[in-house]
Image (cartoon, rainbow, N blue to C red):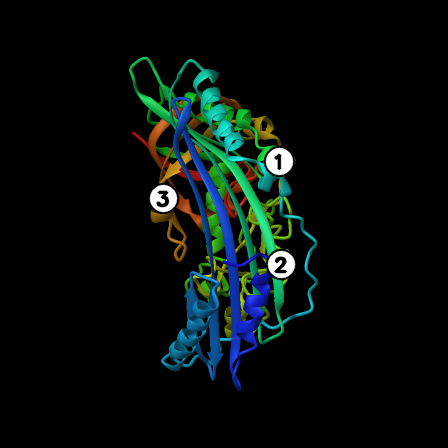
Amino acid sequence: MTDSNSLLATAQRVVARARGDEQIEAYAARSKSTEIRAHNGDVESLSSAESFGIGVRVLVEGRQGFAYAGSLESAAVDEALVAARDNAEFATVDPDLVMAQPDGVAAAELDLVDPSLGSFDVARKIELAIDLEARLRSIDEHISGVESSDYFDVFGEAALASTAGFAIESAATRAGLTAYALAADSDGITQTGFGWSVSRGPGELDPGTAAAAAAERATRLLGATKPQTGRTTVVLDPFVTAMFLGIVGSTFSGEAVNKGRSLFADRVGDEIAADLITLIDDPTDPAAYSASVFDGEGLASRRNVLIDGGRLVGFVHNASSAARAGVTSTASAIRGGHTSIPAVGCRALGLVPGDLDRDELYRSVGDGIVIQSVAGLHSGVNPVSGDFSTGAEGVRIRDGELAEPLREFTIGSTLQRMLLDTVAVGSDVELMPMSASGLSLAIAGVTVSGQ
């Protein structure tokens, strides 16, 4: 194993061995994580893992080879370089396959490491998970059980070097509490609710917030019935909005556009959403859970506006997708660590919030349904055609107030119509343990299929 200061040096040593017209990129990474689950006031499971390794890309005469090693020892690194070269020899020539080049954009100054994580011992982490479970069990008489009460954290660091001149390194920490509560009515019918608290370090986590959210989502669904079939306004819960944005974001991938698999291809400049919608991918926002100083190819992260007041501004690209489209990279290369090559995608999505808090938004809607959770979202949505159909549960809004709970129904529309039919954007932004933030989002004219 190696110390943290040698990650970049290891990557640079690989790049220094480039031959002739070879282009080489080396991405070295290491992470350390902890996961704890509490049950009945004790530890049900505890795992601590450390992973490290290096991925090597070789590009020569339009052919790309990639290989990785799960070690930073010299012999393993050497083998990865040899394997990448061998793989390049048999690869298909792609003239648009390129590596990123420095573009002069200065890196944002982001402090994404909470140093307290290193001194926060396991015993205190266990206390947080157990405290979360205890709060869940005592917060409401209808809470019949706790499906999960988890603590997690991760410290990750990475370094990238390439023959293009990149020599960068970055690090980030994340910590969180997540919980699923079970609530039961007098007939023994149970409902579940999810709650969370996330931050850069464990010291800022709030078990009370996570427990209260899980309990509220579970108990307010007790006694739920099927709604009548019809069309109505739905209000997406912030957690559902974040998942919805993740799917919408996939349609803005430059790779999807190049392959003709985006429903918004060739529509730059068009009005594709209500003028209330401004959608931004901003990994330079330090509050974003997935914030990062650099993208997966070494370019400085930047703020990319995708929809501005309802108008489609553009798509996100890495170096290769940009070359194919004849544009420049938006520093939107994503990668799943050292074991994968850079792909392209949104990195920290969020809607510009509106002026209405949650209660004010409900009152503005008048009558509708809060969609608290959805089932089968990814299988029920086609990002190519835009067709949207998914199972859901939630709460009726009547005369601007929350009323009876609802379950076992589906909501249907298209992504295109949902963006155009948005009638209110909430001010209740919530940080999520994912690559999109959430807020309440009201969408008119959605088909509800119940009884």
Report which residue position mark 3 lands on: 389
CA gap between label 1 and label 3 equals 26 Å
Q: Residue at x 50, y 45 (%)?
A: 434
Identify the amino acid type marked 2: Ser
Q: Nearer the viewer, mark 1 or mark 2?
A: 2
Q: Is residue 372 visible?
A: yes
Identify the amino acid type marked 1: Ser
Choose between 272 and 302: the one closer to the eye: 302
Callout 2: few (<14), some (14-19), or many (20+) C-alpha neighbours within 10 Å?
many
In the rendered image, residue 129, in percent from the top left (x then y), is placed at 47, 29
Choose between 101 and 304: the one closer to the eye: 101
> Circle 3 — which element?
strand
Callout 3: few (<14), some (14-19), or many (20+) C-alpha neighbours within 10 Å?
many
Q: Residue at x 47, y 76 (%)?
A: 58
Residue 339 falls in image quadrant:
bottom left
Report which residue position mark 1 lands on: 427
CA gap between label 1 and label 2 equals 26 Å
Circles 1 and 3: CB distance less than 8 Å?
no
Choose between 86 and 248: the one closer to the eye: 86
In the rendered image, residue 260, in percent from the top left (x then y), is placed at 42, 66
Looking at the image, is mark 3 or mark 2 earlier in the sequence? 2
- Which label number is shown at residue 301? 2
Identify the amino acid type marked 3: Ser
Quadrant location of the C terminus? top left
